[in-house]
Image (cartoon, helix red, strand yellow):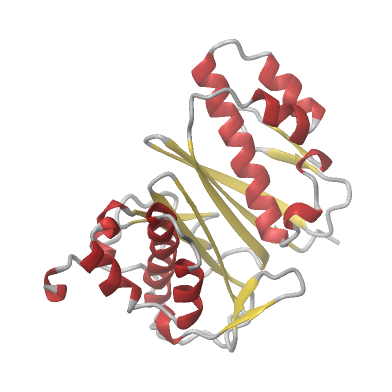
Amino acid sequence: MHSEIQPVSERASFFTMFDGAVRLCLLEVSFLEDPETFDACLKRLSAFRKEKTMKYRPLTSRCLSLGAGLALDCLLNAYGLAERDMVYTLSEKEKPAFAGYPDLLFNLSHSGKAALACMGRRLPPGGIPSQAASSTGSGRRGASGENGSGEHHPDIKELGCDIEQISSRDHMNIARYHFHPAEYKRLLQISEPQKRADTFCRLWTLKESLLKATGEGLSLPMSGFYFDLEDSSPPQCHWPEAVNHYSFEEGVFPGYRLSCCIGTAPCP
């Protein structure tokens, strides 16, 4: 019965980045492969997300897209909102946003069997309900770096996230043609296959999170900017044409890497 389906929030993992300024929801989507569960969960989403989900033909892809929408719904619930009630607009770069909530930013990603949603807000918080919660409810677990208050956070102009399943296959051809020469050189210096695969995935998610934050997509080649990776410090992005200042935080889950990027106004 539909009433017996476990609440999505109880299946999800919630955590924060950038000192609580960005909330994230990670959802493993295997449970959506059950047809009854899939149909019941699809009914919870907006027409916009339903259409995006059903455009995919493979069941695996549909489950991932649906999972991303459900993860977004979990984050919206903290603001007293529901995804099914949201109306979307598209920017000139085809990046979706919430109509009526211009200060509420979000981004979605999925890979393997995992779906990810992130959410932050511009300052001041105009248009966001005053009852916005400081946590994401009883399903919240695995929090990292959360200050709980939400009082002090950067003025986020852009937001992007990416999650990728770590694969042991050889990615060097992709890196050779699509990464910056400095990043390709770094990968060549790693002899251990698993460490090389993990570093490739780390670079990929960082680059994708930036592209998704800016909305540039394929219009900005991945070779047009590069990252310095040092274990003792946050990743540093080198992109001379950057309009905003970009900061990155990363996460590791079994078999996956994820990155989150925020764009803030540069210092005067």
In this view, 42 is above or below 239? below
- Left or right of residue 265: residue 140: left
The residue shown at (71%, 21%) is: 186
Q: Quadrant of residue 33?
A: bottom left
The residue shown at (75%, 68%) is: 93
Residue 229 visible in the picture? yes
| Quadrant showing the N terminus | bottom left
The residue shown at (57%, 21%) is: 196
- Most extreme residue toward the top, as rendered? 191
Depth check: 248 or 30 in front? 30
The residue shown at (43%, 87%) is: 85
Residue 158, image x and y in percent? Answer: 68, 64
Depth check: 33 or 126 in front? 33
Q: Quadrant of residue 130?
A: bottom left
Residue 112, image x and y in percent? Answer: 42, 44
Figure label count = 0
Residue 39, image x and y in percent? Answer: 28, 72
Residue 202, image x and y in percent? Answer: 58, 35
- Left or right of residue 239: residue 234: left
In this view, 243 is above or below 259? below
- Left or right of residue 121: residue 237: right
Depth check: 12 or 123 in front? 12
| Quadrant showing the C terminus | bottom right
- Most extreme residue toward the front, as rendered? 57
Residue 149 visible in the picture? no
